[in-house]
Image (cartoon, rainbow, N blue to C red):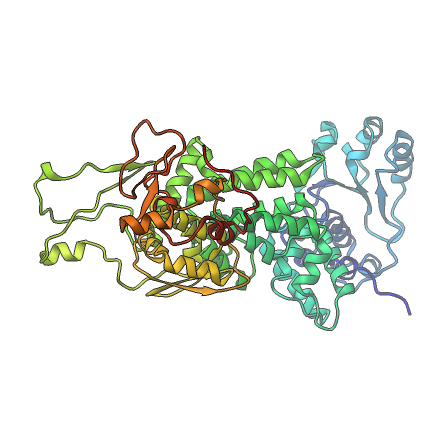
Amino acid sequence: MDSPLALYRRYRPETFAEVIGQDHVTEPLRAALAGNRVNHAYLFSGPRGCGKTTSARILARSLNCDKAPVADPCGECDSCLDLGRGGPGSIDVIEIDAASHGGVDDARDLREKAFFAPVRSRFKVYIIDEAHMVSTQGFNALLKLVEEPPPHLRFIFATTEPEKVIPTIRSRTHHYPFRLIPPRLLTSYLSELCEKEQVTIEPAALPLVVRAGGGSARDSLSVLDQLMGGAGPEGITYSLASGLLGYTPDTLLDEVVDAFAAGDGSAVFGVVDKVIETGQDPRRFTEDLLRRLRDLVIVSAVPDAPATGLIDIAEDAAERLVAQAARFGPADLSRAADLVATGLTEMRGATAPRLLLELICARVLLPGADHSTDGVMARLDRLERRMTISGGDPSPAPTVEKEPPAARPAPHVVEPTVIEPVRRQDPDPEPVAAAAVPTTAGRSTLTLVDVRRLWPDIVEATKQRRRLTWIYLTQQAQVIGVDDTTLTLGFANAGARDSFDSGGSAEIVRQAAIDVVGHDWRIETIVDPGAEPEAVAPPPPRSPADLAPASPSAADQLGSPSVTEPGTSAPRDAGQEVPPNDTDGGARPDDSDAENTGVDGAQLLQEALEAQVIEEIPHQ
């Protein structure tokens, strides 16, 4: 049993009405054929696979149709049948591949045979494909014939590079430029072919086929033919298309985009590792990531872009892109896209594409290290987004002053943003003032993803209050769940959880969340053996002597928390200020070891850092 013809041959158009995406060419040609105003020479130019040679054959069929002059061939006469799909061809329509017959001798041979009258048809038609491959001498040999052909002769030149056709030939032809086929039109066409072939195709797979075809009908049909050949009973699935065509799966792109939005470096570099471990090309991944960022930039500017067809994506992915775009600011997205585009250019020909990909990701993750205008705008976007997430308003809300202007504290300036200091309200404020002051005990609209995105800032805020709490959060805890009233933290072991609860760290986290997010949660802790700390910076290395608390006996004698003065054995109160000239590494007021936690140094090291003390050297 003979195998079927290739898909692009089985569905090659036979009339101008069947040619898709080239109405600017086919309609004028049909008008010229219907009005019997056909020129003696044509030049069809455009990208490969867009219908130049096919249109030349349709033009030849229309010229030699028994019902000519006619806009479209009838498909019933001998000439139409000979030149139709699967026909034997016509002796009076000669196709020449100029890539192998473009020399001066070939041109002279053509010129000698051209003067013979057609055998069966009305016209003798020469279709010269890849016309830019004809040498200058060959064009010069054809120049007189093309300029003044015999009445029965017609020329059709087809080329992808019309500028290489010498001007003297171009000036004697009617030039029709073909274009790439629009993605939406090509998607609809491929879907119709799948229905005709009775092959099921997932909507998410069609954009991949169109993208692989690059706007060429022939290339797109070749890709679709390959997928049809490899499809199983379930048809052409997204996983089959992405795997065979080498595109990055959407799940991987969703993962890295969400990690960028949350500032989660661990997740970002985890995706890079997956790309390498699964054998994918880092350059292709970077290109796919850039395309995703481009879609997000458009969605950020035009929220209904997926619905209006402004971006070519499957319907089930539209909501996902809108949600992702909402997690970025316009400047943040634009900066990320610029960095990825620049990095993609640098990756071409690079010997270490993984290294360059990791550097690209590092630049995207660190807008704070970028002092250019784009970096500053990206940081401003993040601040505004944080205020929006927490239910605030980037613009200052009007409040009723209960104190004279002179008593008002000066505002603190953080980066480009002005934060007004908190002022004590009267016990019974006026209704206007009560409505204007935000509350932290109301209903929260934050999701778990939002809290995890803001978690590094909350952890950093705890560092300013108690360093021991900060160590627990960076080494042992992660956010497990969140609702209107409760924030749940998971700890890797019971010892760390018990020490966290008994030391009052939950209150420290609650206050930090109020300052950063603006919502008052009750902090609950659970033991989660699979818990891993969130993506926050590790604490600086510290010696056992620094981490060891004050002697319990001294605390018992004084009846209050105490620490040891640097260089002495005499205890001092935890609240006592350190002398200004104390620069030998003594405890600071915000240090965790400046408080009596009831945990000795060895236990603290074991729980917080999972370390074991081998030998302790007394501090000199």
- Residue plotted at (10% across, 53% down): 426
Q: In which quarter of the image is residue 244?
A: bottom right
Quick check: 439 left or right of 105?
left
Visible residue check, residue 409: yes
Between residues 103 and 76, which one lies in front from this camera angle? 103
Count of marks placed on residues? 0
| Image location of residue 410, percent across then percent down | 19, 36
Quick check: 457 left or right of 78?
left
Q: In this view, does 399 lie above or below 102?
A: below
Q: In this view, does 213 lie above or below 590?
A: below
- Residue plotted at (74% across, 50% down): 59
Quick check: 544 left or right of 253?
left
Between residues 114 and 305, which one lies in front from this camera angle? 305
Visible residue check, residue 25: no
| Image location of residue 413, percent across then percent down | 28, 36
Quarter holding the N terminus? bottom right
| Image location of residue 435, percent across then percent down | 17, 57
Between residues 604 and 330, which one lies in front from this camera angle? 604
Between residues 425 and 271, which one lies in front from this camera angle? 425
Quarter holding the C terminus? top left
| Image location of residue 197, percent across then percent down | 73, 69
Q: Is residue 77 above or below residue 155?
A: below
Quick check: 390 left or right of 134?
left
